[in-house]
Amino acid sequence: MFKIHQIPALETNFALILECTTTGEVALIDAPDAPPILNACKELGLTPSKIFVTHHHWDHVDGIAPLREHFDLTIYGPKAEAEQIGQLDIEVEPGTTLEFGNGHLNVIATPGHTFGHIAYFLVEQPTLFAGDALFSLGCGRMFDGPPDQMWAGLKRLRELPDATQLYCGHEYTLSNGAFAQTIGPTNKALLARIEQAQTQIDNGRPTLPTTLGNEKLTNPFLRADQIGIAQALGLDGSNPVATFAALRKAKDQF
Ligand SMILES: [Zn+2]
């Protein structure tokens, strides 16, 4: 059994504490900021021994050094970004599987937001830690691209089971929803998700986790190969990569 503790950090980030309740092993997914993580670990009585890093951006790694002063940590992260992160003990490559507790994390290539971005999928209790590759109703800004590789990464995530619990690096659901609504104004599942997210925010709760199945129905960035998305962008007949790139650009300008 695994428990996931989701801790708001910085302005919009989430720190995630992953606990294997069978073995007692505890890990973090990214380290946006040390103080809220330290507080949560203290409150929960947890001692992390690993950090699984998704990408090199400061709001995902700045907590590593200060956390190392409190815990004996092994830092895992994308080999492609080892130089940028600078603190990795274990450089991991997409396609590999890591052991955690009595389970396994599959490492999935999700480049585009950054060139070496990876996501982690907990096999035994389908859970996706998507970092900034995929958000609820959106995806990460394409800093590095190229669009065909970013689209390929999102398709890899889309292949995971519908029941997969999706955790992301940021609370962006409502702003993503406002854009998604301009692309799919008649998508009933999307409208229901926006309403749900609004209620969650109004009640001071996070909009995550959600399920990957729901994202497949509502997130335009996972649906760039659906005819309605190209039509909404005035790109009838365009290929999915071009549609995805246009979608990402439209969101940047939204
Ligand atoms: Zn980022």
Image (spheres, helix red, strand yellow):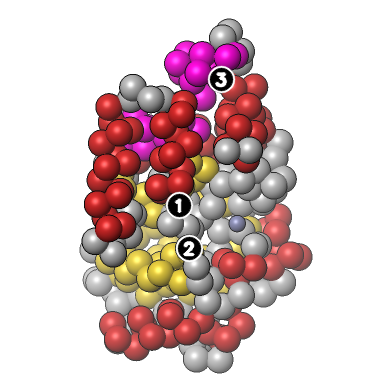
Q: How many marks?
A: 3
Q: Residue at x 57, y 86 (%)?
A: 66
Q: Secondary structure at mark 1?
A: loop
Q: Between marks 1 and 2, how big is the CA–CA gap?
A: 7 Å
Residue 225 sits above or below residue 2 on the image: above
N-term mark: 2 or 3: 2
Q: Between marks 2 and 3, how big is the CA–CA gap?
A: 29 Å
Q: Which residues fall within the magenta stretch?
A: 214-235
- Contact between labelled residues 2 and 1, with CB atoms less than 8 Å apart: yes
Residue type at mark 3: give it.
Answer: Leu
Residue 5 sits above or below residue 165 on the image: below
Rendered-image quadrant of the N terminus: bottom left
Q: Magenta span: helix, strand or loop, mainly?
A: helix
The label number, if any, that marks residue 172 in the structure image: 1
Q: Residue at x 47, y 84 (%)?
A: 35
In the image, 66 versus 142, the foreground residue is: 142
Q: Secondary structure at mark 3?
A: loop
Q: Which residue is mark 3?
A: 233
Residue 65 sits above or below residue 122 on the image: below
Residue 120 sits above or below residue 163 on the image: below
Q: Which residue is mark 2?
A: 12
Residue type at mark 1: give it.
Answer: Tyr
Residue 142 can be seen, yes or no: yes
N-term mark: 1 or 2: 2
Dot 2 crowding, Cα within 10 Å, few <14, some 14–19, many 20+: few
Which quadrant would residue 241 be assigned to in this image? Answer: top right
- Residue 98 in the image, given as x and y percentages of width and height: 48, 59
- Residue 204 in the image, given as x and y percentages of width and height: 28, 64
- Residue 133 in the image, given as x and y percentages of width and height: 54, 47
Q: Between marks 1 and 3, how big is the CA–CA gap?
A: 22 Å
Q: Residue at x 41, y 25 (%)?
A: 184
Residue type at mark 2: give it.
Answer: Thr
